[in-house]
Amino acid sequence: LKEAYGVDELTVMQGTLLRNLLRGEEDVILQGQTGTGKSFCFLVYLMQIFISKGHPSALVLVPNTELALQWGVWAQKLLEAYQRCLVRENQPRGLVLAGAGEVRTLAAHVPWLIIATPQRVQELVNERHLNIRHLSWLVLDEIDHLLRLPSRFARFNTRLTREKNPKPTEVILDLIYNPTAKPADRTWRPRLLVNSATVNRTIRFYLVKAKQWTNDHAIFINALPNPTPSSPDAIVHHCLILDGNTIRNLRPREAIATENAARRETAYGPSETDLDDAETPAFTPKFLEHLRTEQGIKATGFDGRPRPSASTSASSEEPTPQIYVMSEFIARGLDIPNVTHVVIVGFPSNTQSYIHMAGRTGRMGRSGKVFTILQNQGSIELRAHNLFQYFSIQPEKYDLIDD
């Protein structure tokens, strides 16, 4: 860790997690604030197993390709540092990002670490390129987004459709942890490790009771400082309202109560529903190009790979980007160094998504600012207040805006 990242010691949360991971074989479900190093800690644990036991095999499921690439960068950097520390001549093998070009590698040998989206793993299993019975560990990063369970308020038809059309993650988990399997088939079972900043009771019930994917003594670690998911204290939140040709701060709840009284029945705040695959917002290059050409904003997308530092990019044709543009789906779980500001345009697709988008800043105790920009339509301000209240956030007035 010190060789690769200059880390001398783990955080309190990481220390608690590692102790639970190392003390037994129980499944672990972790809930912790964004930016506290949850995913990285799981990787450190897998690296420790790799070093001590030689050649285990772990599968990491992530919701998007960008996060898979980030996991790959972390793992490769740790492997390189491990090799330098041991002064070995041959590189440790066994890191596979399960893309189209790695199918032969998977067929030739079982890697110690496979990082992929559920859709890709499902394809590899169906095409018999990946034998999941070689796995010793299964990590589900951003579990709520991998499952995307229907809301408790979802209509019966929505629930029925979902039951008939399970997500790829569910298909994989059913293959591995089939509760109806014969006793002779239960001798093999990978250890299940789960994490997210938002692992609510519905998700835990689904994992443990409804689907029985976890073992009998699964450990739930709630590393949140508050009973419900919250934003780190170092993050300052602002909410700006576009009202015609003007922009202003979110008004106090009392100031909007009267004019919203007539439409209060529609102002329940953000729903807990999530997006289906077909509705998942995709990153649009046209929008990024519009920012560059029409607005003159030097923005770029993000693919999970490390960017050159300011010093190394000084003589490069491509300077270090200062503005990244991405959808909330792509941004999920990404650790982008030194992000000081997050701008959220439009209302989040669901309640929990706000915490994940805001959590791209204020990481590992650093400070940050989050601006949510909303069009003044309907009861949008009351919905915004409900959103912030849910997470015990008090949005601050942005002084550069004249109200």
Image: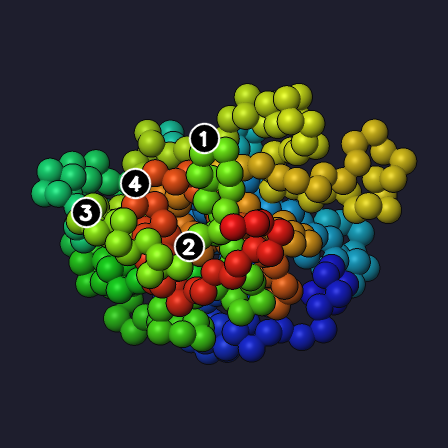
Which numbered tag is attached to residue 378?
A: 4
Q: How far apart are the alpha carbons under marks 4 and 3?
A: 11 Å
- The residue under label 1 is 282
Q: What's under tag 4, amino acid-wise? A: Gly
Of labels 3 and 1, earlier in sequence is 3
- Give whichever of 162, 100 is nearer the camera: 162
Residue type highlighted by circle 1: Ala
Task: Name the residue type under label 3.
Answer: Ala
Viewed as shown, does residue 288 lie left or right of 64? right
Q: What residue did someone put label 3 on?
A: 262
Nearest to the observer: residue 91 or residue 156: 156
Q: Residue 251 carries which label?
A: 2
In the foreground, 340 or 7: 340
Q: Is mark 1 on a helix, strand or loop?
A: loop
**Badge 2 or badge 1: first in the primary sequence:** 2
Determine crowd level at label 3: few under 14, some 14-19, many 20+ residues with C-alpha closer than 10 A.
few
Q: Which amino acid does label 2 sit on?
A: Arg
Give the SS element for disc 4.
loop
Instruction: Tell me whether circle 4 and circle 3 mark residues in contact (CB < 8 Å).
Output: no
Mark earlier in primary sequence (1, 4): 1
Instruction: Residue lying at the far left in this picture: please name it.
Output: 156
Q: In this view, does 216 lie to the left or right of 72?
A: left
